[in-house]
Image (spheres, rainbow, N blue to C red):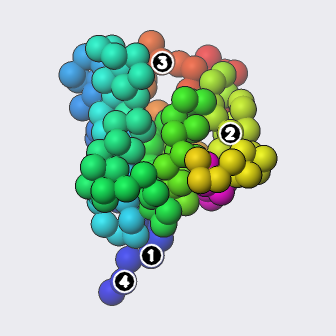
Amino acid sequence: MENTQSEIDKMFMRRCIELAQKSWDGGDAPFGSLVAKGDVLVAEGLNEASTKVSEHAEVISLHNAHNVVGSSDLTGHTLYTSCEPCPMCSFMIREYKISRVVFALTSPFMGGFTKWDILQDEEIEQFKPFFGSPPEVVAGFLEKESKEVMKNTPFWMFGSDVKNH
């Protein structure tokens, strides 16, 4: 039986949630990310921003995918992440030409999709070959499960219920 996109998305988002927990257990912020092509895992990334501020989980998974694929053009790939990418990560997603982004928790204070429209910005696409087309975005996927990792951390500002904090 062939995996449906929903089953694939669940599998990879659950892995991002595991990576977020592993990041937290290792002393960093609870974020995890991975890059996949179809149902094939290409690369993963843990958050390492406590040692180097630019080392967000998304950035690390994108760089790792680049090393695996051998190209900065990740068209046809999906980036999964436990939390909405920030502006820095969102620009990198656009530069790596990721076709699809799936994230669990929204980031209404700093998200590159809900706060700023970087992921959906069509104007920057004109600067080819630097930026790719806006990716398809699936927001709030397995949000409740991802929020569980955050419950014992000071990171209350993520998710659709932050106004109820």
Magenta stretch: includes residue 106: no
Q: Which mark is residue 155?
A: 3
- Label 2 and label 1: CA atoms lie apart by 28 Å
> Which residue is under mark 1?
4
| Neighbourhood count class around disc 3 (C-alpha, 10 Å): few under 14, some 14–19, many 20 upward | few
Instruction: Specify the segment rendered in magenta.
Output: 131-136
Q: Residue at x 63, y 24 (%)?
A: 110
Would residue 152 be found to the left or right of residue 43 on screen?
A: right
Outermost bottom residue: 1
The kind of residue on which mark 1 rests is Thr
Which type of secondary structure does the marked residue at label 1 adopt? loop
Q: Are marks 4 and 1 in contact (CB under 8 Å)?
A: yes
Q: Position of residue 113 (x, y in %)?
A: 67, 39
Q: Residue at x 71, y 30 (%)?
A: 115
**Earlier sequence position, callout 2 versus callout 1:** 1
> Which residue is under mark 4?
2
- Label 3 and label 4: CA atoms lie apart by 37 Å
